[in-house]
Image: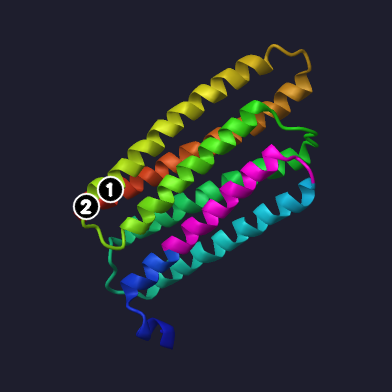
Amino acid sequence: MGIREWVIPQDKVFFDHFERLSEVVMEAANALVALVEDYTDVKSKIQNIENLEHEGDRITHEIYEQLNVTFITPMEPQEISRLASALDDILDYIDGTTQKMFNYSITETDSHMRELAKLIRLSVAELQEAVRHIRSIKDPRLIETRCIEVNRLENLADDVLAHAIMDLFKTQDAITIIKLKDVYDYLEIATDKCEDAANVLSDIAIRHS
């Protein structure tokens, strides 16, 4: 164990990692919205999101490494692992969406992509606030309220996806249908991953209140 781990209490290390990871997810969600709202300089914007995904992987790895060397943790080890994985999954699907857009040579975005991206950003903002509250859970309702909102946003994303698919199948171009449906699906799955993270946070709030 290094000097940093001796100096900084172990619970603070984990919470610092989670707060930094949620910040990176927020940066990626903002970058996604910026991309779909202004679909120019696409390669550079996608590269930025990929870099953020790599940073998220690095932080997640640090959380797992810390977990392996810490005997007393502020939460159950399984809770720490689940939350790290859930936040990292959101990043994976944000990055995966933009990689598909690039690989499929998508030339323009549409209202469905923009709406789904905004729902992802709103969900991540709620998660970021919830993560900040797990450092000291004085009122679990503060976390639970955020998590309920994420669930509501995920339901809205389901509706957006349904309308997007309906509009898509009004077209006759099979290749376009395949490409856009894949992009829509990845965006919607990102909201599912937000809901997964919210469920983990809700469980933590209940267990430690």
Q: Which mark is residue 139?
A: 2
Residue 95, compared with residue 101, is above or below; it is below
Q: Which residues are magenta?
A: 18-40
Whether residue 82 can be seen here? no
Q: Position of residue 115 (x, y in %)?
A: 58, 31
Q: Position of residue 4 (x, y in %)?
A: 42, 84
> Looking at numbered disc 1 in the image, what kind of residue is underneath it?
Leu
**Disc 2 from disc 1: Cα separation:** 6 Å
Marks 2 and 1 close (CB-CB < 8 Å): yes
In which image quadrant can residue 149 be found?
top left
Secondary structure mostly taken by the magenta-highlighted segment of the chain: helix
Whether residue 104 can be seen here? yes
Residue 86, compared with residue 158, is above or below; it is below
Residue denoted by label 1: 142
Residue ID at (45%, 71%): 65
Left or right side of 59 for 71: left
Q: Position of residue 120 (x, y in %)?
A: 52, 40
